[in-house]
Image (spheres, rainbow, N blue to C red):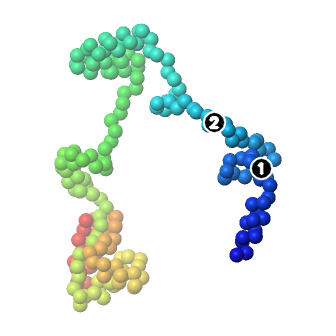
Amino acid sequence: MRFTPLSRLICRLPQRDICGPLQSRTLQTNSVPKDSLAKPRKYKIPQFYDPYGPRPPPSEKIIQLAERIGELSEEERGQIMPTLSERLNLPKLQPISTDGLDMGSEGAAAGPKAEEKKAEKTAFDVKLEKFDAAAKIKVIKEVRAFTSLGLKEAKDLVEKVPVVLKQGVTKEEANDIIEKIKAAGGVAVME
């Protein structure tokens, strides 16, 4: 009810039709009045965007060259690029290494290579597979011995079986850890 007199007062204020319906530029001193009868400008938008601008049409020499290349056989077209790279002294392209990338169908061919890499492995992970419930405290003590974990962290880690206990250790150190875990009543493996 109280807003009704306020809205009537606002409606009685003189209004200038300078801007469009939802715009107000009364505080801007440099605003230019908008002609309400003016038609909107139409811009010519290109069919596709070319960042380099319009290109001149190819010369007659280029057109003849393209026609001659089109008439060549598959073999001859395959020889064009190597010949041009020799003639123009272009640098030779180096093959890109695909080690560590999943190449899809070539995964079967990469299988033997992966087996060779496992044989050459120098850093190993020690994984706790299982342990006897009666030997849980001994296993936690052994985990604390070769890690820098506190009692609570070691207990939480052991309870998450199977879990990686230590990563990136040498083969001798991994074997030593596995023997200690086995003596405490757990089963650990090297990965």
Q: Is residue 63 above or below residue 143?
A: above
Whether residue 105 sits left or right of residue 156 in the image: it is left
Q: In this view, does 175 lie above or below 159?
A: above
Q: Quadrant of residue 67?
A: top left
Q: Earlier in the sequence, mark 2 or mark 1?
A: 1
Residue 114 image position (x, y, % from top left): 23, 52
Q: What residue type is labelled 2?
A: Lys
Q: What residue type is labelled 1?
A: Arg
- Mark 1 element type: loop
Query: From where the camera sits, is residue 154 visible?
Result: yes
Residue shown at the point (26%, 13%) measured from the top left: 71
The residue carrying mark 1 is 16
Name the residue at the bottom extreme: 134
The residue nearer to you, when weighing 110 against 80, is 80
Q: Quadrant of the image for the N terminus?
A: bottom right
Q: Quadrant of the image for the C terminus?
A: bottom left
Q: Is residue 51 above or below residue 183?
A: above
Residue shown at the point (57%, 32%) measured from the top left: 43
Whether residue 113 sits left or right of residue 63 in the image: it is left
For label 1, count other residues whose C-alpha is less than 10 Å away and answer few (under 14), some (14-19) or many (20+).
few
For label 2, count other residues whose C-alpha is less than 10 Å away and answer few (under 14), some (14-19) or many (20+).
few
Residue 179 image position (x, y, % from top left): 24, 76
- Mark 2 element type: loop
Query: From where the camera sits, is residue 183 visible?
Result: no
The residue carrying mark 2 is 39
Mark 1 and mark 2 in contact (Cβ < 8 Å)?
no
Q: Kindly report the distance in space between the C-alpha atoms of the residues bearing marks 2 and 1.
A: 20 Å
Q: In this view, does 171 lie above or below 72?
A: below
Residue 53 image position (x, y, % from top left): 53, 26
The residue nearer to you, when weighing 141 against 101, is 101
